[in-house]
Amino acid sequence: MLEMIKNPRVMTKAQAEVRQVFEGKGNVDETGVHQLKYLKCVIKETLRLYPVIPLLIPRESSCVVNGFEIPAKTRVIVNAWAIGRDPNYWIEPEMFEPERFVNSSVHFMGTNFEFIPFGAGMRICPGILFALQNVELPLAQLLFHFDWKFSWGMKQEDMDMTEKFGVSMKRENDLVLVPGPYHASITIA
Ligand code: HEM
């Protein structure tokens, strides 16, 4: 929501998609969520810039990485946050640009090592599908039913991006936005 309110172009595009898919129904439900291709790109882009667990869970294993031998019992911590912003792999990495995932096969299922918000390999997050359902549906509902604005008196340049230090990445302060109702038309079959 934060990146979309900062980038009205993205908000408008995501909202248009959701409203186009669910117009006539008057509500968002699970049946049409698979059609929300752009919204899925928005979620991917969010996970690239803001991986929920920026430093993946430490693992111990003996292996060879780029010719460097990692002996058993070495504590290795993978920085998923830095990988998601690595300019060797991402064009303009600091930009919030969901279009980079449109027509791209890069996914977070653990085979594209430049994008690992859920980890990779044997210990990849087993909750990926459950997690996505719990993001896609509520986000689509928020976009379908409301037009969003900054809270009163706030401007784009006042946007507070401070993050809280911890195992999972959170905002330091709440994001306060003002919803305006959207009146969807309902088609009765
Ligand atoms: C957006 C939401 C979520 C994100 C970004 C996320 C991310 C992660 C990451 C990065 C790991 C560590 C993987 C590694 O060390 O390589 C992990 C592990 C794990 N996640 Fe998630 N997760 C999410 C939601 C969930 C949900 C909803 C569940 C359960 C219903 C879940 C269950 C687990 C479990 C059990 C592990 C440990 C797996 C293991 O060590 O073998 N996660 N998750």
Image (cartoon, rainbow, N blue to C red):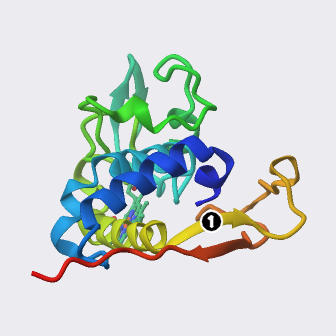
From this view, report whether residue 140 is shown above or below residue 104: below
Q: As drawn, is 164 to the left or to the right of 80? A: right
Q: Position of residue 4 (x, y in %)?
A: 58, 52
Residue 148 figure quarter: bottom right
Q: Is residue 35 in view?
A: yes
Which quarter of the image is occupied by the C terminus? Answer: bottom left
Q: Quadrant of residue 81?
A: top right
Front residue of 136 and 154: 154
Depicted 113 relative to depicted 142: above or below = above
Q: Nearer the viewer, residue 73 or 115?
A: 115
- 7 relative to 10 in the view: left or right: right
- Quarter of the figure with residue 151: bottom right
Residue 82 image point, x, y percent: 58, 36
Q: Amino acid at mark 1?
A: Trp
SS label for mark 1: strand
Q: From this viewpoint, which residue is outermost toward the bottom?
A: 188
Q: Residue at x 80, y 49 (%)?
A: 156
Residue extending farthest to the left is 189
Q: Is residue 76 visible?
A: no
Q: Which residue is mark 1?
A: 148
- Front one among 141 and 93: 141
The N terminus lies in quadrant: bottom right
Disc 1 CB within 8 Å of nearest ligand 1 atom:
no
Q: Residue at x 29, y 67 (%)?
A: 23
Question: Where's ligand 1: which quadrant?
Answer: bottom left
Q: Residues within 10 Å of mark 1 (few under 14, many from 20)?
A: some
Is 150 displayed left or right of 64 in the figure? Answer: right
Q: Residue at x 32, y 45 (%)?
A: 108
Relative placement, left or right, of 22 versus 53 is left
Residue under the point 35% across and 60% down: 18
Height in image: 44 above or below 68? Answer: below
